[in-house]
Amino acid sequence: MAGEDIGIEPATSKQYNRWKTLIPFLYDWFNNHNLVPWPSYTCRWGPQMESHTYKNKQRLYLSERTDGSAPNTLLVMNAEVIRPRVAAAEHIAKFNEEHLSPFVKKHKVIPHPGEVNKIREVPDIPHVVVTHTDAPELYVWNVERQPAEAQADAEPTPDAILIGHKENAEFALGMSRKGSCVASGGQDKMVLLWSLEDHKTALSSTSADNSANLQKAPKIEPRFKFQGHKDTIEDVRFNPFSEYELCSVGDDKTLLFWDSRAGTSPVLKVLKAHNNDLHCCDWSPFEDHLIVTGSADKNLRLFDRRKLTLTTTGAAVVHCFESHEAPITTVEWSPHAKGILASSSEDAKVNVWDCTKFGARQSVDERKYGPPELLFQHAGHRSQVVDFHWNPVDPWTCLSVSDESSELSGGGGGTLQLWRVNDLIYRPEKEVLAELEKHRNQITGTKSGTPKPAAAKQLPLQSPSKAASAGKEGPPDTNKGEGEPQKMEEGDGDGCAAK
């Protein structure tokens, strides 16, 4: 988007400017890249290509969602990812919203049949990806086979086409960690499951096929067709420990569980899992009984699969995460830290949550900035965050994209941001304070061996998690006193319980 505050309310602009001043405290590294002229509706980290002393080179997968005046494309980008504790604070705080980042460069622009709504990489063949579009078909691409520069009128050349849906399937796309299985949901209310196992040899070859075209691409039928939803399916995820088990959510407000070994009917159900349409879900990579869902009702809910039956209602929710001010778009557990998950929303925020903080005591001042489990809030986008992805090889590092193509947002393209949370925010507080104490002289502006001013002697060193709280949005500070820590009252956090 152009650097003007077109379509942005004054309060939002003020909050954004406040966030910019906190960048050196909130992030270990931050990078902003302007996506012009078209936004991307999805983003994924690809394989790490090179590793150096101060930075790594890593693939990114994005898209260009056009208005029809130009072809839709699948983008393969190269990003220079600065290593932890390398970037200088004064450098990450300076960026121009109108400019392309020198750290992000296009590698390939691949013509795509229709818009690209979701991308998922095949875990054991990272240069092969599957895309969801605005049609019943899904497409499989070996990006290394694709030409570096396609002609403007070039025909899309996918390596395989997944067929089976009777109506459009736009967003629900999942990939198993084992067995190279793909799952998809659509407007036909079905969850389909394909296996790429028999096609891996052909798909993984990087030899270019100059005769390939859309008509010649092999078509793969689904192995299973699961039925049970009563409305459009919005997301589907595999159990990280099994290629047979998966879950799905949809506009019928239900969360359904499937097991291909047990047939094509649901094995577990959560009826009315939320009070509105469900947009997304994810399965914990550390504890396979925990599943989190996100909804148009602005909330996230945590479910324990061990407590579910075929007639479970939303009242079985283990915990409700409340902080977002608009519908949830994506939710994903951290692949590196147990109990950590993140969510994006149409409120232009990415929230990072810590499940170990449920019910933790908060001071009056802390309670103004959200519940105790809200660990961090990324507020760098100006418009709805349509997707984000944890970096699978770089802990606490994320990729997020927002859509600024609407007239309200200024009619620009979109924004891509790469960011890593400052480790002083999530590390144990005693450990953090001990590290800060070693650097007290630098922090307080005094020299070693010289008498300290009285103010410096009295200066308390607080954990930077306080800065993270300051970066969260909250009401005006009308009470300067911190107040006494308060226990969570009975019923706190239950505002999104099913009714």
Image: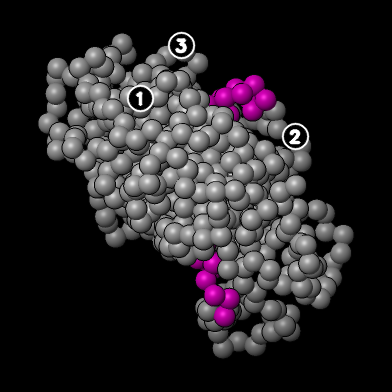
Q: Residue at horizontal 50%, vertical 25%?
A: 187
As measured in the structure, the alpha-carbon distance from the residue carrying label 1 to the one carrying label 2 is 45 Å
Q: Nearer the viewer, residue 141 or 439?
A: 141
Residue position marked by numbered label 3 in the rendering: 69
- Span of residues in magenta: 404-430
Tell whether position 254 is magenta.
no
- Residue depth check, mark 2 versus mark 3: number of the one nearer the observer: 3
* Tag 2: amino acid: Glu
Q: Nearer the viewer, mark 1 or mark 3?
A: 1
Which residue shows up at 68% across the image and 53% down it? 315
Task: Give the residue type that dot 3 points to.
Answer: Ser
Regarding residue 382, the answer to whether it shows in the image is no
The residue positioned 14% from the left and 17% from the top of the image is: 211
Q: Nearer the viewer, residue 489 or 470?
A: 489
Task: Please say whether residue 274 is visible from this viewpoint.
Answer: yes
Picture coordinates of residue 154 (x, y %)?
Answer: 28, 14
Locate residue 469, reporting x and y percent: 67, 61
Question: Disc 2 and disc 3: Cα gap in Å?
Answer: 30 Å
**Could you tell me how many numbered marks the image carries?**
3
Amino acid marked by disc 1: Gly
**Left or right of residue 31: residue 437:** right
Label placed on residue 9: 2
